[in-house]
Image (cartoon, grey):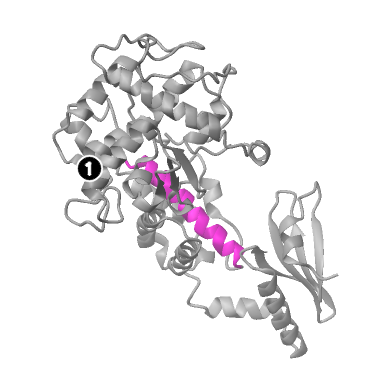
Amino acid sequence: MALSDVKCRNTRPASKLQKLSDGGGLQLWVQPSGTRLWRLAYRFDGKQKLLSLGSYPVISLADARQARDEAKRLLMAGADPAQQRKFQKASSPKDTFRSIADEYVDKLKKEGRADRTISKVKWLLDFAYPTIGDKCIREIDTATILIALRRVEVRGRYESARRLRSTIGTVFRFAIATARAEADPTIALRGALISPTVTPRAAITDPKALGGLLRAVDAFDGQPTTRAALKLMALLFPRPGELRAAEWEEFDFESSVWIIPEARMKMRRPHRVPLSRQAVSVLTSLKQISGGGSLLLPGVRSGSRPISDNTLNAALRRMGYGKEEATAHGFRATASTLLNECGRWHPDAIERQLAHIENNDVRRAYARAEHWDERVKMMQWWADCLDELESKNARVISIKGRGKSAVHSPPRGSTLNPTSAAHQTPRGISNLRRSY
């Protein structure tokens, strides 16, 4: 029975190799690991042979059938498809590491990957090209790749060397999937490089110190758009890049929601952000400044480009906060820490608001709830708490422990309105991928 794309895609891995037949000798091998490989079984000169056609879905069902038909034509002409491929590889000028890497980058572009992601990949590959760029990819061994990595590592750029190894490995796996390489030499280099020292981004997690930062932001005498951006980082705690490139059409003021398109999200999923009253107020004031264009935060030199990725951190330095004290990205860690410590909100609601993705495949398949109603209440509560912390007369207390607020309850008539939908926080946080 002929295969369908749905069957190719949905057949679940088993404990043993599964061979799905499409007819004419074409088979899809579903490995226990989940890898799906095209194979063509045929006979030549009285011997049973097997030809690798690449992996699914890089090689689609239609492409695999076309490759099968081409192999059949070679057999009818008296040629061995496997031997013919060896001749083509030996004479092909397209099998250099550089040419295959270029194909891989083009694939990322077609998949709609972020420009910044593609730029990072190209930047890393430039380190590899002097050593292995013009070599045939099948002739590149582990020792040669290590030379390229050591040239980066010797400069003290340990993280760049580690990422370069991973990127080179990705190119090799792409070559394997397209039947132009047999193995990934970078696997043997795991543990061969110096491990970089991981330094988390600086963030203020003390409520009193946070109040001081909020007052400094409010008094910032730089560009009004920069001051507004810092306020929105504190209120909404998105990733800085998500805010910098935001456009006015993403904001629905009637529903009080900011919808970030998947193309600008790290995990490539659209993300909704509830807008508190305070966030709407900041946005309304900002619209009077930048509302004439499409960008929320246009740059000073060009209204068609957003503020640079260093603008917010530079503003924090002008306010006297060193890079070891506060960063724009640190607002995410600030919110995560204090919201979890207050004990009012379910950890999953906090993680969804941070746009984190469940790291466990099984749990991710079932944990699809967005906790939207709770997140709406949480974001308003958080904005109210920031208002209270910003007040010079706020009596700040520790928020560690369940059920405690970040500040003392305000006098009757205050805007602070802690939610009545408090949750008991379970010990530990769900096993989610962190991105601070």
Judged left or right of residue 200, residue 434 is: right
Q: Which residues are magenta?
A: 156-178
Q: Which residue is mark 1?
A: 225
Quarter of the view holding residue 39 = bottom right
Please tell me which residue lies in front, 402 or 27. 402
Q: Is residue 141 visible?
A: no
- Where the N terminus falls, by quadrant? bottom right
Q: Main secondary structure of the magenta part?
A: helix
Density class for disc 1 (Cα within 10 Å; few <14, some 14-19, many ≥20) is many
Q: Is residue 58 visible?
A: yes
For this orientation, the residue located farthest to the front is 413
Q: Where is residue 24 drawn, in percent x and y? A: 81, 76
Residue 397 lies, with reference to residue 326, above or below; the image says above
Given the image, on which type of amino acid does mark 1 rest? Thr
Front position in the image: 170 or 211:
211
Residue at x 68%, y 74% (from the top left corner): 62
- Quadrant, the C terminus: top left
Mark 1: secondary structure: helix
The image quarter containing residue 372 is: top right
Q: Is 164 included in the stretch rendered in magenta?
A: yes
Picture quadrant of residue 86: bottom right
Percent coordinates x, y for residue 397 in the rendering = 36, 8
Residue 227 place in picture, x, y as percent: 22, 36
Which residue reaches farthest left? 221
| 33 within the magenta span | no
Residue 428 horizontal/vertical position (percent): 57, 20
Left or right placement of residue 220 versus residue 46 in this view: left
Residue depicted at x 45% and y 18%: 418
